[in-house]
Amino acid sequence: MELNKVINTDSIEAMKNMESECIDLLVTDPPYKTITGGDSNGKNSERPKGMLSGNRKLFAHQNIKISDWMPEVYKVLKQGSHAYIFTNVLNLTEMLNESLKVGFKLHNLLCWQKNNCTPSQYYMKNCEYVLFLRKGKAKWIHDIGRSKTVHQFDNIIGNKTHPCEKPVALLKFYINNSSNKDDVVFDPFCGTGSTLVAAKELDRKYLGYEIDKEYFDIVIDRLNCCKGGV
Ligand SMILES: C[S@@+](CC[C@H](N)C(=O)[O-])C[C@H]1O[C@@H](n2cnc3c(N)ncnc32)[C@H](O)[C@@H]1O
């Protein structure tokens, strides 16, 4: 397996050809369905408008089935490894059920508290959820004393490279806690490559897949610009 690479391809197909148990850590923000958190048709002026209207997509390749990729990410992870999978509240039940079905065990439901929020008629959303899972035997995170379930990191506001871009500092927090130098960090839905940049800057090996050519090109630029040991 070639490492320190991002590949412009469908990761579900690519993972079928990956050998089993070759990855030390999964950190991924997969595509999932999004719906409005507010007044989707704008008819009721007293209700806050949702960020999205109806089932409008944030990006092209959004509606894939969780059950199509969850078994593949489980297969490629080594025994005794951790997985961090971002989800929103509407996909949380399915994401957790599918992860347990393939064999993951739940360590914790993490909450990234952001410095902005999305309007919603059912409490404004100022956090995102992350399933913190393990495959096989449990192992401790590194920074036990300072790692809380709810953690604050500034969201990227304004010039985002991807509508769902995650802060590199947040991804470094997870990577530092669950891997060591030269471990292989994997993101099968890498968007514009935030996980890969974080991994590279922390001297981890990395592998990423992105199906959208425009995002893929941005990952290449970001990886060329960031500092790292590889
Ligand atoms: C939620 S975004 C990830 C954004 C990322 N967190 C970042 O900081 O840039 C999910 C990405 O998965 C990609 N994607 C969707 N289906 C895919 C597939 N089958 N194979 C590879 N990438 C896919 C989408 O194009 C999208 O860029």
Image (cartoon, rainbow, N blue to C red):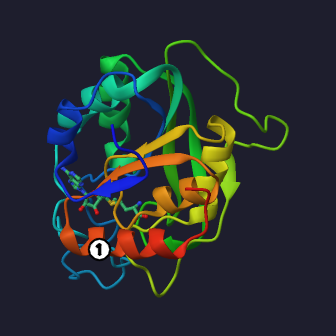
Could you tell me residue 99's position as x and y percent?
35, 27
Residue found at the far top of this picture: 137
Which residue does the image show at 22% across and 59% down from the upper left?
Answer: 8
Q: Considering the numbered disc 1 on the image, is that residue within a helix, a strand or a loop?
A: helix
Tell which of 113 and 38 is nearer to you: 113
Which residue does the image show at 60% across and 45% down from the upper left?
Answer: 175
Tell which of 62 and 81 is nearer to you: 81
Tell which of 105 and 227 is nearer to you: 227
**Quarter occupied by the N terminus:** top left
Residue 52 in view of the camera = no
Crowd class of label 1 (few under 14; some 14 to 19; many from 20; radius 10 Å):
some
**Quarter occupied by the C terminus:** bottom right
Q: Is residue 44 left or right of residue 222?
A: left
Could you tell me residue 118's position as x and y percent?
45, 72
Which residue does the image show at 40% across and 76% down from the upper left?
Answer: 221
Q: Quadrant of residue 180?
A: top right
Could you tell me residue 207's position as x and y percent?
39, 48
Compared to 21, does 195 lie above or below?
A: below
Compared to 228, does 151 lie above or below?
A: above
Q: Is residue 57 left or right of residue 141?
A: left
Residue found at the far right of this picture: 145
Could you tell me residue 226's position as x and y percent?
56, 71
Name the residue tied to disc 1. 217
Three-letter amino acid code at the position of disc 1: Asp
Which residue does the image show at 32% across and 47% down from the upper left?
Answer: 188
Residue 102 in view of the camera = yes
